[in-house]
Image (cartoon, grey):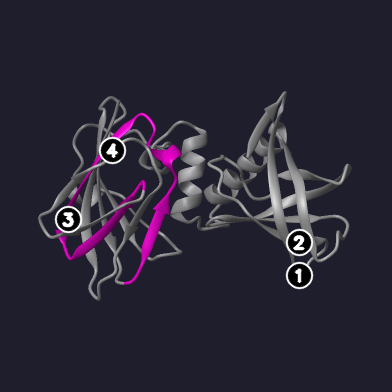
Amino acid sequence: MLQRYSGHKQFTLEGGEKLPTKTAGFSYQFEFGEEANIFEGAMVELLIEGRRVAGNLTGILQGRIIVTLQEERGKIIASSILRINNTALLQALHDRLEKIERGEVSPSAGILVRLATAFDLTLAGLLLRAEETGRLFRAEAQPQWRDPRTGYVRRQIFRASDHPVEVVQVEMPAGKKASFPASSYVNMRHVVWVESGELVLIQGGDRNLLKAGDSLGFGPPSDVTYANEGKKPCRYIVTLART
């Protein structure tokens, strides 16, 4: 559960399991289902049985986080409070953006979405934030980006700073999926149209199988998973508009 107080974010964590590690510190993995813009590398502290223990946020996974502490707290941390200073979050965000711009890291789609949400941008707005584009997008000039985690390829068909609509083409490899939090769909409306193959769309607990030619308009913001459960690549178009 997220709690807020001046200058900080605060979360309740339970059932932290100690992980083997070859690096300095003592790492614990917790289940974490909150929608929060948090970033790896942020300095944090855990409040455990009234004692404050300093550490860093060293891993953000699907439904889990990893916190590395400066002192060991046994094999299991039954209950604790995670506190993250907002300044530490901004510094972690700044460091991550610099590494991306220098080409030192190749971020996954999930990381890029969290960064974009932090700046109130769409994913395209983040990827193209340094480029000025007109209203004409020639095919040869449409930028592409490959997600290193899933291998899916994202092609920006249209985006203009003075236009409310964006159009993206995605090719999802067989057997792969990508998930995005509800926060990335706030103040936007999405429509997905499948060009080829089959796509399973899971939104807010609703599961839909889309075949070539099928389209689906998204409802209120909720977590979304795009999955290709077939044996062939799936290509689909995403059209979104800010509201």
Q: List the residue tagged with mark 4.
A: 219
Cα separation, mark 4 vs mark 3, equals 18 Å
Image coords of residue 3 (percent x, y): 66, 32
Residue closer to the observer: 30 or 37? 30
Q: List the residue tagged with mark 3.
A: 194
Q: Earlier in the sequence, mark 3 or mark 2?
A: 2
Q: List the residue tagged with mark 1.
A: 21
Q: Earlier in the sequence, mark 1 or mark 4?
A: 1
Q: Specify the label residue 163 is tagged with.
A: none
Q: Earlier in the sequence, mark 2 or mark 4?
A: 2
Part of the protein shown in magenta: 175-204
Residue at the location (70% across, 48% down)?
A: 13
Establish if 17 lies above or below 181.
below
Establish if 180 lies above or below 6.
below
Quadrant of res 25: bottom right
Q: List the residue tagged with mark 2.
A: 27
* Neighbour tally class for label 4: few under 14, some 14-19, many 20 plus, Cα within 10 Å: few
What amino acid type should be assigned to the residue bearing mark 4?
Gly
Quadrant of res 200: bottom left
Cα separation, mark 1 vs mark 2, equals 7 Å
* In the image, residue 93 lies in the stretch drawn in magenta: no
Q: Earlier in the sequence, mark 1 or mark 3?
A: 1
Q: Residue furthest bottom?
A: 231
Q: Quadrant of the N terminus?
A: top right
